Image (tube, rainbow, N blue to C red):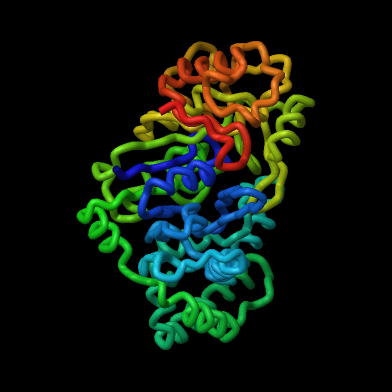
Amino acid sequence: MNICVVGLQWGDEGKGKVVDILAEKNDIVVRYGGGANAGHTVVIGDKKFALHLLPSGAVRPNTVCVIANGVVVDPEVLLTEIDSLSQKGISLQGRFFISENAHVVLDYHKAEDRLREESLGKNKIGTTIRGIGPCYSDKVGRSFAVRMADLVNIEKLKDKLENIVAYKNKIFAALYNAQPINAADIYEKCKVYSQKLSQYVCDTTAYLHEQIDGGRNILFEGAQGALLDLDHGTFPFVTSSNASSLGVGPGCGVPVQMINNFIGVVKAYTTRVGAGPFPSELENETGQYIRDKGHEYGTTTGRPRRCGWFDAMVVKYAARIGGINELAMMHLDTLAGLDEVKIGYTIDGKEIKMFPSNIDKLSKVQCVFKTLKGFGEDLSEVDSFEKLPAMAKEYVKAVEDAVGLPVTIIGVGPSRKQTIFRK
């Protein structure tokens, strides 16, 4: 069985934990999109792993990990993660592959990201300044793109980098009056990247199809969340790739017909980082309570996340476009202690059947709420659905009714054991 795990909100839903748990029963975990702007957290005992590029299955010593062609790879971040795992006794040798067609994030991408965002002033998008957008732009533009295959053929890369950097410096000087980037310095870094990463580079599309033909189980890991999808999210406050499950096919070369189950991960409430619409946002003490109790600060940026009630229309929309079969609800324990909890429904003067991702339409919507009694008990030791407080079970069922999908996995804490399976 092949499974895709994807976030159904604005990212940070808890995909890392879900992927880590499911990786135990799968042979291969594949990252198919995004870049080092993603932050997936895995907690094993007293150890916490924050992964940005490596698939969350990397912490399991027998799981093969693949970074597919849809990912933009920051070699510095990737090497830091590999070294960090090595220091904790986890080796990727013989079980890690990077697509030769994955594009590479370099220093000029990060500089461009920062300069562009600073120039926007109050209209900035809220990018992580990791160079993700500029790298995807070069991918689409083709002429100035660098791929992992170029790092393998390092001698040919020197002239290419000189041409790219000369062009970038003209843009930086003309638009931002910025200091020039040195092509020789970037090339020297690329030589190091080539030396350390070339051993992992291959045709991952061919590899994945060979493994599927051989009957191996593959887990496809999404980055960010469906509402940050470049085409179907709340544009322009989105990421630069297809962050929904719709990105699987182009992101790794495996068609969706070969995936048996799509699991959508949600929080028991809603969060988002940076600017953009957020109909159910709580800009009050309750929002701060959720932020503090849920440790809602970005894995990648450290920025405080905006918090709000669970928006059923957001999740229903994301589930519909992504072909989701079931839900994994994380952070149910964060809501414990509140006198009441709410489920939001986005409306535009009347009930709507589809969440409007268009910004102009979103500016006119409101969120109405269904209020339920809170559940004050600590949930961190609960190990079955039957043992949950009555109102916690009522809340889960209300979410199922609102979205129209079963909640089959429930997170009541950050560790592997703090997970309830209903299937």
Q: Number of callouts in the render?
A: 0
In this view, which residue lies farthest toward the right? 285
Give the quarter of the image for residue 11. top right
Residue found 68% across the figure and 70% down from its top? 177
Residue found 49% across the figure and 47% down from its top? 20
Q: Quadrant of the N terminus?
A: top left
Residue found 44% across the figure and 70% down from its top? 93
User: Observer-nearest residue: 319 or 182?
Assistant: 319
In this view, which residue lies farthest toward the left? 213
Q: Quadrant of the C terminus?
A: top left
The answer to whether residue 126 of the structure is visible from this angle is yes
| Vertical order, 327 against 62 (above or below) | above
Left or right of 77 in this view: 194: left
User: Observer-nearest residue: 188 or 286?
Assistant: 286
**Residue 112 % position (x, y):** 60, 64
**Residue 25 % position (x, y):** 38, 46
**Residue 382 % position (x, y):** 60, 27
Residue found 70% across the figure and 44% down from its top? 297
| Vertical order, 361 against 145 (above or below) | above
The answer to whether residue 147 of the structure is visible from this angle is no
**Residue 417 % position (x, y):** 56, 39
| Vertical order, 264 against 27 (above or below) | above
